[in-house]
Amino acid sequence: MDAAYYEDIAGRLRGLQIRLSDRLPADSHALITEFIDHNELGLALEQMADLLAESEKPVSPDERTDMLTLAKTMEIERRVNQALALCHPA
């Protein structure tokens, strides 16, 4: 994969982080940003999904689709899908 691929994924993750910021714990933003900055993109997505699931926060159909699309691209779809299954629809 080339640098443009990783930049695209990182940008999409940053967008999700912004969209979900009202439902993610305030103290988690620095960790998620650090994962993205250090190219730990799968960990960033898993962390977002886990945090939403732990607190059973609602996720809109569009957000769910975006997260699962990214997860499929990164080949972590099963893991993210399991976490999102615990989230209520928005």
Image (cartoon, rainbow, N blue to C red):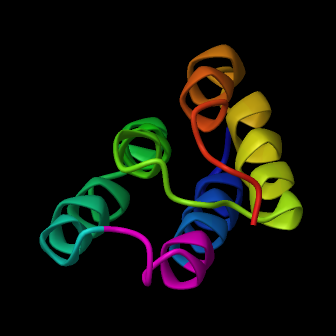
Looking at the rendering, the stretch of residues picked out in magenta corresponds to: 15-24
Q: Position of residue 31 (x, y in %)?
A: 18, 60
Q: Position of residue 67 (x, y in %)?
A: 70, 50
Say above or below: 71 vs 62. above
Q: Position of residue 59 (x, y in %)?
A: 68, 60
Q: Is residue 20 magenta?
A: yes
Front in this rendered view, residue 83 or 7: 83
Front in this rendered view, residue 2 or 26: 26
Say above or below: 57 vs 29. above
Would you say 43 lies left or right of 17 here? left
Say above or below: 81 vs 51. above
Residue 66 found in image quarter: bottom right
Q: Position of residue 58 (x, y in %)?
A: 62, 61
Front in this rendered view, residue 86 or 6: 86
Would you say 55 lies left or right of 2 here? left
> Which residue appears at 66% of the width and 30% of the height?
85
